[in-house]
Image (cartoon, coloured by chain):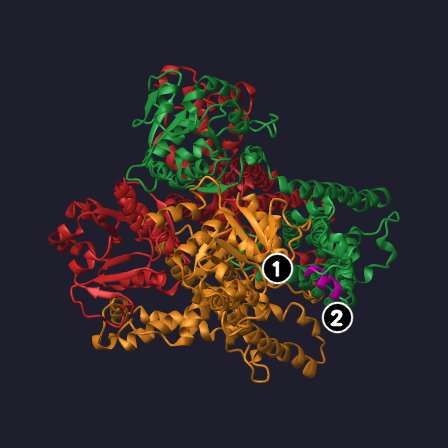
Chain colours: A green, B orange, C red
Amino acid sequence: MNKNSSNKMALAPNTSKKKETVCIFGTGDFGRALGHKMIQSGYSVVFGSRSTQTSSLIPKDAEVLSHAEAAQKAAIIIIAIQRQHYNFLTPLAEILHGKVLVDVSNNLKINQYPESNAEYLAQLVPGAKVVKAFNTVSAWALQSGTLDASRQVFVCGDDMEAKQMVMDIVRALGLTPLDKGSLLAAQEIENYPLQLFPMWKFPILLSLGLVTFFFFYCLIRNVIYPYVYEKKDFSFFIAISIPNRICPILALTLLALVYLPGVLAAIIQLYRGTKYRRFPDWLDKWMLCRKQLGLVALAFASLHVLYTLVIPIRSFVRWRISSRTVSQALNNETEPLNTTNAWLSDSYLALGILGFFLFVLLGITSLPSVSNNVNWREFRFVQSKLGYLTLILCTAHTLVYGGNRFLRPSSYVWYLPSAYMLSLIVPCIVLVVKFVLLFPCLDKPLTRIRQGWERNPQYSE
Amino acid sequence: MNKNSSNKMALAPNTSKKKETVCIFGTGDFGRALGHKMIQSGYSVVFGSRSTQTSSLIPKDAEVLSHAEAAQKAAIIIIAIQRQHYNFLTPLAEILHGKVLVDVSNNLKINQYPESNAEYLAQLVPGAKVVKAFNTVSAWALQSGTLDASRQVFVCGDDMEAKQMVMDIVRALGLTPLDKGSLLAAQEIENYPLQLFPMWKFPILLSLGLVTFFFFYCLIRNVIYPYVYEKKDFSFFIAISIPNRICPILALTLLALVYLPGVLAAIIQLYRGTKYRRFPDWLDKWMLCRKQLGLVALAFASLHVLYTLVIPIRSFVRWRISSRTVSQALNNETEPLNTTNAWLSDSYLALGILGFFLFVLLGITSLPSVSNNVNWREFRFVQSKLGYLTLILCTAHTLVYGGNRFLRPSSYVWYLPSAYMLSLIVPCIVLVVKFVLLFPCLDKPLTRIRQGWERNPQYSE
Amino acid sequence: MNKNSSNKMALAPNTSKKKETVCIFGTGDFGRALGHKMIQSGYSVVFGSRSTQTSSLIPKDAEVLSHAEAAQKAAIIIIAIQRQHYNFLTPLAEILHGKVLVDVSNNLKINQYPESNAEYLAQLVPGAKVVKAFNTVSAWALQSGTLDASRQVFVCGDDMEAKQMVMDIVRALGLTPLDKGSLLAAQEIENYPLQLFPMWKFPILLSLGLVTFFFFYCLIRNVIYPYVYEKKDFSFFIAISIPNRICPILALTLLALVYLPGVLAAIIQLYRGTKYRRFPDWLDKWMLCRKQLGLVALAFASLHVLYTLVIPIRSFVRWRISSRTVSQALNNETEPLNTTNAWLSDSYLALGILGFFLFVLLGITSLPSVSNNVNWREFRFVQSKLGYLTLILCTAHTLVYGGNRFLRPSSYVWYLPSAYMLSLIVPCIVLVVKFVLLFPCLDKPLTRIRQGWERNPQYSE
């Protein structure tokens, strides 16, 4: 006990008078940057290197020794060397016995090696306590102090005490340690900095597919058809008119796809009579990327708003309006105000404005710093109640836009319905099913199931 | 001393080799989710349950024992049971003596019981050290790892050491503990997850009231009056025209109400000659919800912008413009450019754009993550200087909008002035009083008062 | 060892049963607010004051003693007194020996004194351990609990243990300590709350200069020229038309200036053949304010969007369109649709919309809470790839806007080219140089240099 206690005193940096000595193997960019930062924070730093002559790049107050000498001076050794050169550590195994080795390495590809670098290091030097850390921090950010991207440092390791010592260093450098558990998490931690928006892949691929489909659909209806039958060149519709058809369709469809998995989950729970069985894998994944789906939908909605607002500035639109006015004047006819049209046009716009407004509100509350400041009930209120209201408003916006055009035969070109009709399918399904689920005969058992009740309790075991 | 030291070593999880054992009473959703997460973070978990047979839902590495047996295995016992069943703990009082009991419970209503659940627990087991924690975290979020809503865990308790142990666990689970003080804070902590935007209640109720009033006001002036006297059906104004009158009125009025309490506070301080007396309660409350008032005002301003920008797309507006042009053409008259009108229209729009732009800037700086990155002086500069500039620009925007219509008798329908005139009352009062307060004869004593000077020092005692 | 251990036990607030006693010298606003907050958090507070009679403003549970008596009761003494009065501490030097003195003071001007207040304090009381802290927190925020501005407390000091004790107190008060190193950092910490957006100074001054230049440039071309030669009064262009020329010019130029330093740095590195030599100072400073430059550019782009979208509502524009239509009707001529014009107008608008959309995305990812949630690779992808795409789209938008007007002599008024042509200079340079740098013969050595390779290795020593 006593030994343990005294040992702790010597190691814990923030309780002893003077911060401890840390050894860094490797004098590359990252090793030097880390050493520099640690000296600033009050640590003594010893570099272990093949050639022991100091270069002007190595921080002034640091010593440079051979690997073996440097290792003996410190309890913590940071291995700022690439994985390929790790085997030079094998002869040092005896000296490294009981030391804390910090693996800071990264790979060039996801899952490049069968085991993570940190686990490989642990195999090479079995007597050492390996901790994975610092791999998410860039040398450049450390040196310049502009840690704009993440200040979070993921830490994992099998030895609690060693991990704690490394986390203390992380904190001392002004970074935020995040304990990710045992060394098994090293693979995930090493893959993290190589990821490029993994949660966004599905929403973006899905929307790219839908955009391509609807682009050719609208191209056929609005450019090719008039060219073939009326010899009119409307190719410039590609710039604004067609994007302004695709964007609202995608916004509405993706927004509906945000709420579809919730509805499906409710049906599955009702059918199974229990909440204690896992959802199918695809549904789980779908539910986890709802936020990203919603934000992509919001992006399309914003583009739709911008495309719509520039309509009156477009040269084509100005030409159309003015030629219509001129022909009215020449024919000496004055149209009376059509109140029905005014109602349709105004309510369609008003619904769109309110829907977009709520959509933006949803987007703002999904900002991490905003959602961190609301409690669970408030977050659910916004994301569920306001979300459904947004979906209802946007669907109504599209329905009113259709107005009395739905059954007009002129809307069907080559038997193809207008594109906006296709966009109504998913949202209408979601809204109808959700409405049905609100009936007491379904809502009551569902609520009970969600509180833990089971229809056939044997299932849960 | 020595005993204390060894005791500490055994308990503090992050310095000992192996994390300690934690006991959880109750195998419901929350207990299981918490147990699962704790095992992941390296703790040993023992469940205390009525029936000791393990179910497939209970984490594999956890033991399930009777309550008494489980309690003896750990220093910390998490009570994941509903308040109604707490009395089963009374017979265990002896075993629980000196243990840390963590109350994680929530109620269904705010202030449901006279005393908080944690205080009730402390009464039932007087020998135990009760700590309130984890009640703001949802079981679902713990399990899925998607802690989108708050990562903050409020902790309170009378025993410092026990509280510290619980906060260490909170940190180990990757959450952020927030010490709220003694067990007296438990009531507040238990009410927190039941709140639904408490600070927003007043601004939203106020704006709902104002919206209703101005809706009927505009309905009378713009729909009912022309229907009665001119037999014209302008009912479609309800969709866009009337909302686009209400929104700017509310935006301007609410923005002025953000700055009114500051002006009132200055007057009160000048009158009293000291800053060391509390403001009346209503003023205190008003000052605390200024941010929310401002954001609601910004929402109305944004809606006003959207409603305004769609004006040229509205079917009614297109009809009005084209029929006016047609009649000009038929009457063979060409209007010359009215430079005054062009000036009025352009400067009115420019003031609105600049005012809205600054308003959005104010909104962005009120985002928690932005305001955390500015110092106090910068925050005050933005919120006060830029805020007043916004108010001035928006008020000027409305005044220029009125332009030369103020005194035109046709603006008065049934003796009712235009709605925008009503919206000018509060902002003009605020700006005039603020301007008066800037006179040296008032500004100097005010500054001295705010630095601590008192006119009649005896008041302060 | 043993003594050290027992000492630690007595001091570390979070492990002992009862939090320790803290002494506060000075009963001014800040001292009282801090004392109040500390009592709430469980500390015992003793005030040291010249007059020991308690006032009603001093927290009830606090004792008020003479300075000497109060100092003897605590290991930590917070000096909540202005620097001018520090010399009263000299006679107390013996009592203060070994104590932790916390300097919380601020100055009225940046670098007001040759040495920081904390260093001055350390000179006055050489035996004490001086720690700088709490100076960024306002008394008002402490009392009201509305810490909207920063919760960060910068801490620095030469004694590790003393600093740790103060950081524990900071944490206990619900604030976030940030270790800034030794007492040398005190000057910087004391200057921090006096700063007013230091990183924004250069971007804002630069854009003010450019705004002034382009304002007069456009005034000459668009208002003075037609007044002189055609006797037309277009002075109302000052409100919207001219700002709507200045804003896009500034947005595009500033956006290009964000990417220019990166391109220059690449050229310098290629020329020097190494990355291990510091860039010239001006380039370093420029690179550090790129984010601010980009955000100012985004602000101008947003204003440009708003100014553009109100175009169809402007009285002048309505008059121009309607008078053109009327004259067409009177002359009995109907213009056919000009497809080239339609293409130019639509693609110009579409490019602008997409460019602005990406620009806003860039702005959102620069929000601290968003950039904290992406890894380094994702951050670089957004800021570099998306950034260049934005620059390309916005430059193309301006080029297409020019369209076939470039060579038209009517665009040159008094030999002055249109203002938008000037705005194309910087972005075109950046894009061309960047394009050249992508050629393999330049890209390959550059990549190698950035990985640490050196053409003339002797340079690096």
Q: Residue at coordinates 76% horizontally, 63% vertically from top-left?
A: A437
Question: Looking at the picture, how far across and down is residue A426, in whole percent?
Answer: 77, 53
| Secondary structure of the residue carrying numbered label 1 | helix
Q: Who is closer to the viewer here, A282 or A245?
A: A282
Q: CA distance from mark 2 to mark 1?
A: 41 Å
Residue A447 among those drawn in magenta: yes
- The residue carrying pointer 1 sits among few (fewer than 14), some (14 to 19) or many (20 or more) residues within 10 Å by Cα, namely some
Q: Position of residue B439 (x, y in %)?
A: 29, 70
Q: Nearer the viewer, residue C242 or A303?
A: A303
Q: Chain of mark 2?
A: A
Residue at the far left: name it: C91
Is residue A290 positioned above or below A135 on the image? Answer: below
The residue beneath circle 2 is A339
Q: Position of residue A95 (x, y in %)?
A: 41, 22
User: Which residue is the site of mark 1?
Assistant: A380
Residue at 38 percent of width and 69 percent of height: B262
Stretch of the chain drawn in magenta: A444-452
What subunit carries mark 1? A
Per the picture, the main secondary structure of the magenta-coloured stretch is helix
* Amino acid type, residue under disc 1 in the picture: Arg
Image quarter for residue B456? Answer: bottom left
